[in-house]
Image (cartoon, grey):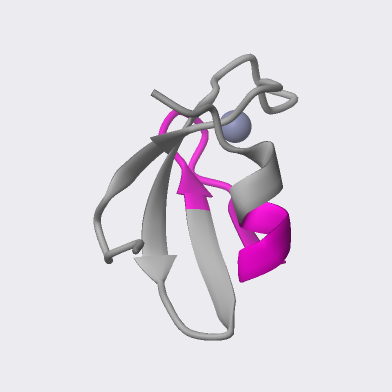
Amino acid sequence: MFEINQEIETKKPHACGCNKWIITRTGADYKIKCASCGRELLINSDKLKKIIKKN
Ligand SMILES: [Zn+2]
């Protein structure tokens, strides 16, 4: 359901104020990268589903 380089939006913004992230790794754990500051975060798929904004 998520693909590498896919852009996602989170409900809550990152500390830098940006709520857009890019998926950089998929699997049991996903790695997402903040589109603004470039900070990377490792997150499991269940948690990722909960924090993203649904279209
Ligand atoms: Zn950020």
Q: Position of residue 27 (x, y in %)?
A: 48, 84
Identify which residue, 37 or 21, lies in the foreground.
21
Q: Which quadrant of the figure has residue 43? A: bottom right
Q: Position of residue 23 (x, y in %)?
A: 39, 57
Q: Which range is magenta?
A: 33-48
Tally the marks: 0
Q: Position of residue 48 (x, y in %)?
A: 63, 54
Outermost residue, top side: 17
Indicate which quadrant contains ligand 1: top right
Q: Position of residue 42 (x, y in %)?
A: 66, 67
Q: Is residue 29 left or right of residue 1?
A: right
Outermost residue, bottom side: 28
Vertical comparison of 24 with 14: above or below: below
Instruction: Kindly identify the residue that appears in the image at 68 percent across and 39 percent down.
Output: 51
Vertical comparison of 31 with 9: above or below: below
The answer to whether residue 44 shows anywhere in this view is: no
Q: Quarter of the image containing the C terminus?
A: top left
Q: Quarter of the image containing the N terminus?
A: bottom left
Q: Which quadrant of the figure has residue 30? A: bottom right
The answer to whether residue 51 shows anywhere in this view is: yes
For residue 35: magenta?
yes
Instruction: Kindly identify the residue that appears in the image at 66 percent across and 21 percent down.
Output: 13
For residue 41: magenta?
yes
Vertical comparison of 12 with 48: above or below: above
